[in-house]
Image (cartoon, helix red, strand yellow):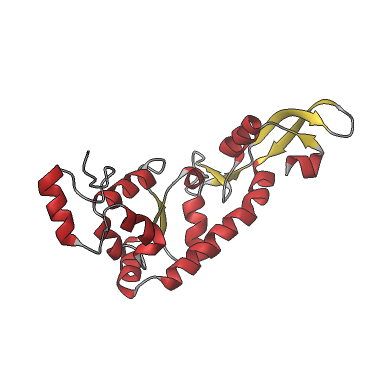
């Protein structure tokens, strides 16, 4: 967007700094002494880039309102995807969502006040996960160690893990007896990273 609006080319690291310092889904707030209601704050930042028309290095100033407007489309698409998935969710899982809310994870969830904006757009309580940068990896590891648990957290095993891929790792879900035999023979459980194969 900086290139489109200002005709200025910036690097990936600069763009990341802008998103981290000025990016938000809703206005920045600041508590003011003597006031019970936080006030909105406009943050500004100077960045250096290469002007494509003048062919030289230039400094430009952008503010948090501009960045929020640039990110609004992405936030809206995230909300639409969240609503769509909730509509496909099983009734018992949807009940848990209504009671406990939705936890968002990953680097994108660190966008300032994203959880509040999604709560408004989706009409469901959304909160940031406690460890947003590692929760996806930890959850995936738990499902790999207990693959049959995926049946309780997704519409079908195909949705998250991929049934064909699981079947190649020791016929998961098709032959429980074979899993027990492999564990007794090799000491490995079928479905782990070793896939329960014997060593020759």
Q: Residue furthest front?
A: 200
For residue 90, side relative to residue 3 (left or right): left
Q: Residue furthest top?
A: 57
Identified at 67% across, 46% down, the residue is 65
> Of residues 167 and 140, which is closer to you in this image?
167
For residue 140, side relative to residue 23 (left or right): left
| Residue 161 in view of the camera | no
Q: Position of residue 156 (x, y in %)?
A: 35, 67
Q: Position of residue 120 (x, y in %)?
A: 51, 62
Identified at 21% across, 62% down, the residue is 175
Q: Is residue 170 above or below residue 121?
A: above
* Quadrant in which the C terminus appears: top left
Identified at 69% across, 45% down, the residue is 66
> Of residues 73 and 52, which is closer to you in this image?
52
Tag count in the figure? Answer: 0
Which quadrant holds residue 132?
Answer: top left
Q: Is residue 77 above or below residue 18?
A: below
Identified at 59% across, 59% down, the residue is 76
Q: Is residue 96 above or below residue 25?
A: below
Q: Position of residue 178 (x, y in %)?
A: 17, 57
């Amino acid at each position: 967007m900086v290139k489109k609006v200002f005709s200025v080319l910036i690097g990936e690291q600069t763009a990341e700094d802008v998103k981290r310092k000025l990016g938000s889904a809703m206005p920045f707030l600041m508590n003011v002494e003597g006031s019970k209601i936080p006030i909105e704050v406009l943050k500004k930042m100077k960045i250096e880039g290469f002007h494509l028309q003048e062919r030289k290095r230039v400094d430009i100033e952008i503010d948090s309102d501009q960045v929020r407007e640039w990110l609004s489309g992405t936030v809206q698409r995230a909300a639409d995807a969240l609503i769509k998935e909730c509509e496909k969710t099983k009734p018992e899982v949807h009940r848990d969502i209504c009671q406990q809310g939705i936890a968002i994870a990953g680097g994108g969830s660190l966008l300032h006040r994203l959880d509040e904006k999604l709560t408004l757009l989706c009409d469901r309580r959304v909160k940031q996960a406690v460890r947003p940068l590692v929760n996806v990896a930890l959850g995936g590891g738990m499902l790999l160690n207990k693959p049959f648990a995926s049946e309780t957290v997704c519409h079908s095993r195909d949705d998250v893990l991929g049934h064909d891929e699981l079947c190649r790792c020791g016929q998961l879900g098709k032959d429980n007896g074979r899993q027990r035999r492999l564990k007794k023979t090799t000491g490995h459980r079928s479905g782990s990273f070793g896939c329960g194969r014997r060593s020759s």
